[in-house]
Image: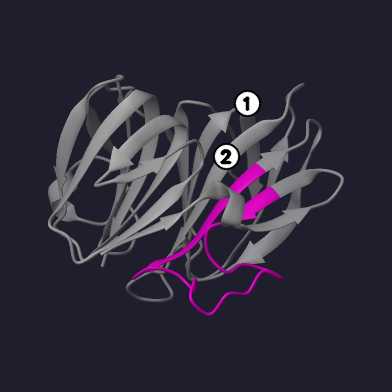
Amino acid sequence: MLEYRPFTELGTFANDWLDAHYHFSFADYADPDRMGLGALRVWNDDTIRAGTGFAPHGHRDMEIVTYIRQGAITHEDSLGNRGRTEAGQVQVMSAGLGIRHAEYNLEDQPTTLFQIWIMPRRQGVAPRWETRQFPRSHGRFDILASGLPSDGDVPIIHQDARVLGGTLDAGTTIARPLVLPHAYLVVARGAVTVSDITLGPRDGIAVTGETTLTLTATEEAELVLVETA
């Protein structure tokens, strides 16, 4: 089953420093039909004005993956971590027993990112944070973070799930096997077709009960995919 979720129909929030679009219910945006997909709970598409950001706040028992599309985010947390994650990198945080963190755009341009929350398979794990460069492969998906032991040396999340990214050249078709029950795909830029559905920039599609996801890029496309139990 495929469910197309165009960018223009996402939940929204805006103030003087943040422009946010919600693929699933979040904060004041509540849609009982969009409460998540399997263990995937949140997918926010955020634009953060230069010199602003999320002040210190706390989380518990959530796996939070941040995919930077443009610009950079500077992270600080209660574990003593501080680091800058820029476009072409992914930041992974396990909130676990509890962590306070801040995410600031200290750049001179807006930062755009996807903020992805995945519910852990168990509560109370030790909190942790890391950031890592990811490959810019063409014609395939690379694993950016995973809770599956078979996925090797990638940032760990505490769930049977993986976060992937990839770029397809215009005219390329790939068939991605799906071994987990649910998947959610978002086009960061460009355009692809899935079955007879065309997805443009920042559109999403929910996939349930399929064994293969076949994609054709109608123009060069940067893609982010979450597969999850």
Identified at 62% across, 35% down, the residue is 112
Identified at 33% across, 26% down, the residue is 218
Q: Is residue 208 visible?
A: yes
Q: Is residue 104 left or right of residue 134?
A: right
Q: Which mark is residue 71?
A: 1
Q: Which mark is residue 113?
A: 2
Q: What amino acid does circle 1 point to?
A: Gly
In the rendered view, tell whether residue 158 sits above or below residue 89.
below
**For residue 71, which quarter of the picture?**
top right
Q: Where in the figure is residue 198, as x and y percent of width and height?
A: 37, 41
Number of numbered markers: 2
Q: Is residue 185 left or right of residue 5?
A: left
> Pointers 1 and 2 in contact (CB under 8 A)?
yes
Which of marks 2 and 1 precedes in the sequence?
1
Q: Where in the figure is residue 159, as x and y percent of width and height?
A: 30, 64
* Prevailing secondary structure class for the magenta stretch in the rendered image: loop
- The residue range painted magenta reads 20-46
Q: Is residue 64 magenta?
A: no
Q: Quadrant of the C terminus?
A: bottom left
**Between 82 and 105, the one nearer to me in the picture:** 105
